[in-house]
């Protein structure tokens, strides 16, 4: 499999030693980023919010095992130092190195370990599937599998890797995403396209409703394939981000099922998204999903507290396994066949389709079920 290493001008490598990993990605070009909206931001986020304003990156260095979050002035100095380690390894200006961290909050970086790992793997970076897999594995924490995506456009490619499994909520989740394209895209347009893509994908996944201190998505355009139609590029980037977002939801901590909720007939797209996110975040909906209990009332109740105006007596609700859909509510009237609805919940993917009949807006959000395993993972996360 190739995603980022299927993009011209991108090389990578990674190492994982116990809980501690390091990934290096080398690619030069215009760049943009989106970041957590949490008031408590990790020092790497504070650093990159300033650094990305230049609209250019030469490389990215990412560690796992320690979030370098809530670490004060030392954390800020350590984030800068981490960028210097990456800059020296690649022979580039540290100001053009992206820095990201993920792991336990409230712990300081082990910079000697990071420098040692960096020095060992920097000479090994290459453009290959193996190198990409190693990089994707290096940034994993509680993830069970690495996550990749590659979208082919008209003469260009968009690829990405990401990590994320728990502490996932809109705006964004505990996720790191590193996206690349060989299209020649100006930094200003790249920034707006990335913001829109993140809003429609990464900001519409919910595992547990907790927002991280370290969320970051960086996109670099090497420009090696030449110019691309801006609208076509924006769609390809959104498609790539959507694939990665769904992979995160599928790999939610302790998850056994993917939940997809599509809202139509809302007053606007953003209001549709608000309803969809509220439903996928509902603990009652998530536990019913785990128990394969077609409790459609929980879906309707969650929609009603999303702060969006609609007539509950006019909605249509259907359930699907991805192939065939079955009615639960029609024009506000209960029409559910419980046995059929329960059958639709037996697989790995469950879809709810809710038409509010209140306007032209539509949106989709993704989540997962809530299981005992989630409690087990997070009850002992630091010990």
Image: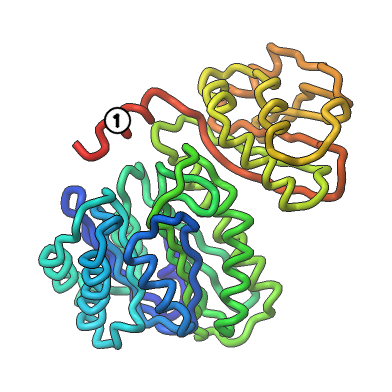
Where does residue 191 sit, x and y in percent of width and height? 57, 74
Q: Can residue 162 be seen in this view?
A: no
Total residue callouts: 1
Label 1 belongs to which residue?
379
Which picture quadrant has residue 341? top right
Q: Which residue is drawn at 32% across and 43% down?
A: 142
Q: Which residue is drawn at 44% across and 41% down?
A: 251
Question: Which quadrant would the N terminus be assigned to in this image?
Answer: bottom left
Tell me the crowding category of disc 1: few under 14, some 14 to 19, or many 20 or more residues within 10 angstroms, Cα based: few
Q: Which residue is drawn at 22% across and 60% down?
A: 15
Q: Is residue 120 left or right of residue 91?
A: left
Q: Where is residue 318 in the image (x, y as percent from the top left)?
A: 75, 28
Q: Position of residue 260 (x, y in %)?
A: 62, 38
Estimate the x, y position of residue 379 in percent, counting from the top left.
29, 30
Compared to residue 211, the image places residue 44 above or below, namely below
Is disc 1 placed on a helix, strand or loop? helix
Q: Foreground residue, 262 or 312?
A: 312
């Amino acid at each position: 499999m190739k995603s980022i290493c299927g993009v011209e001008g991108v090389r990578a490598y990674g190492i994982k030693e116990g809980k501690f990993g390091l990934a290096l990605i080398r690619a030069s070009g215009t760049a943009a980023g989106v970041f957590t909206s949490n008031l408590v931001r990790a020092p790497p986020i504070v650093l990159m919010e300033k650094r990305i304003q230049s609209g250019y990156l030469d490389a990215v260095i990412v560690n796992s095992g320690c979030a370098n979050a809530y670490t004060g002035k030392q954390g800020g100095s350590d984030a800068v130092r981490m960028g210097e380690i990456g800059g020296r390894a690649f022979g580039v200006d540290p100001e053009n190195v992206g820095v990201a961290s993920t792991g336990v909050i409230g712990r300081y970086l082990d910079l000697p370990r990071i420098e040692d790992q960096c020095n060992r793997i920097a000479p090994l970076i290459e453009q290959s599937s193996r190198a990409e897999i190693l990089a994707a594995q290096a940034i994993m924490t509680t993830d069970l599998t690495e996550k990749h995506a590659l979208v082919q456009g008209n003469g260009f490619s968009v690829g990405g890797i990401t990590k994320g499994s728990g502490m996932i909520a809109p705006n964004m989740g505990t996720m790191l995403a590193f996206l690349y394209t060989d299209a020649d895209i100006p930094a200003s347009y790249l920034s707006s396209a990335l913001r829109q893509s993140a809003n429609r994908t990464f900001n519409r996944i919910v595992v547990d409703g907790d927002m991280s201190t370290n969320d970051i998505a960086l996109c670099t355009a090497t420009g090696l394939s030449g110019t691309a139609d801006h609208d076509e590029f924006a769609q390809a980037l959104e498609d790539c981000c959507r694939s990665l977002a769904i992979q995160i939801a599928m790999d939610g901590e302790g998850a056994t099922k993917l939940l997809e909720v599509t809202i139509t007939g809302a007053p606007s797209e953003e209001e549709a998204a608000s309803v969809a996110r509220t439903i996928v975040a509902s603990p009652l909906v998530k536990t019913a999903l785990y128990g394969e209990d077609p409790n459609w009332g929980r879906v309707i109740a969650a929609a009603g507290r999303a702060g969006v105006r609609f007539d509950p007596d006019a909605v249509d609700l259907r359930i699907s396994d991805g192939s065939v859909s079955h009615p639960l509510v029609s024009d506000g009237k209960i029409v559910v066949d419980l046995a059929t609805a329960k059958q639709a919940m037996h697989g790995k993917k469950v879809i709810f389709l809710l038409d509010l009949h209140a306007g032209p807006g539509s949106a989709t959000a993704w989540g997962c079920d809530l299981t005992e395993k989630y409690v087990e993972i997070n009850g002992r996360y630091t010990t």
